[in-house]
Amino acid sequence: MHKEYIEVLEALIDKLTLSTVLEMLERICHKKAENLREHWQDEASAKLWEKAARQVEQLDIDI
């Protein structure tokens, strides 16, 4: 991984908390699934993004 991206992500976590960043990732996954369905008619990929969203949602981290 690129060190600069890790530093950016670490700064976001420091500023917002890990649980907030995970919540944002969950929302992004749902949006990507929605976009794939609406604009690309790609149900298979949309289902993968929805699965990722559910997995992130199941993480119970309060940091």
Image (cartoon, rainbow, N blue to C red):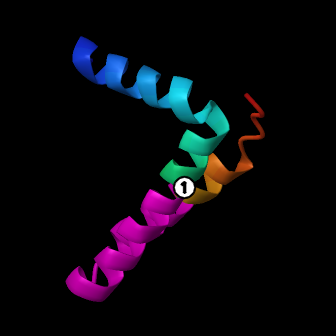
Residue 2, can we see it?
A: no
Check the image and report above or below for 47 versus 12: below
x%, y% of residue 14?
54, 23
- Residue drawn 34% across the image and 17% down it: 7
* Front residue of 7 and 60: 7
Which portion, as a residue range, is magenta? 27-52
Check the image and report above or below for 19 versus 11: below
The three-letter amino acid code for the residue at tag 1 is Glu
Q: Is residue 46 left or right of residue 52?
A: left
| Other-residue count near label 1 (Cα within 10 Å), few / some / many at <14 / 14–19 / ≥20 | many
Q: Is residue 21 left or right of residue 33?
A: right
- Residue drawn 55% across the image and 57% down it: 53
Q: Main secondary structure of the magenta part?
A: helix
Image quadrant holding the N terminus, namely top left
* Front residue of 22 and 1: 22
Image quadrant holding the C terminus, namely top right
Q: Secondary structure at mark 1?
A: helix
Check the image and report above or below for 39 versus 7: below
Which residue extends farthest top? 3
Quarter occupied by residue 9 = top left
Residue 26, can we see it?
A: yes
Q: Is residue 31 left or right of residue 59?
A: left
Residue denoted by label 1: 26
- Residue drawn 45% across the image and 21% down it: 10
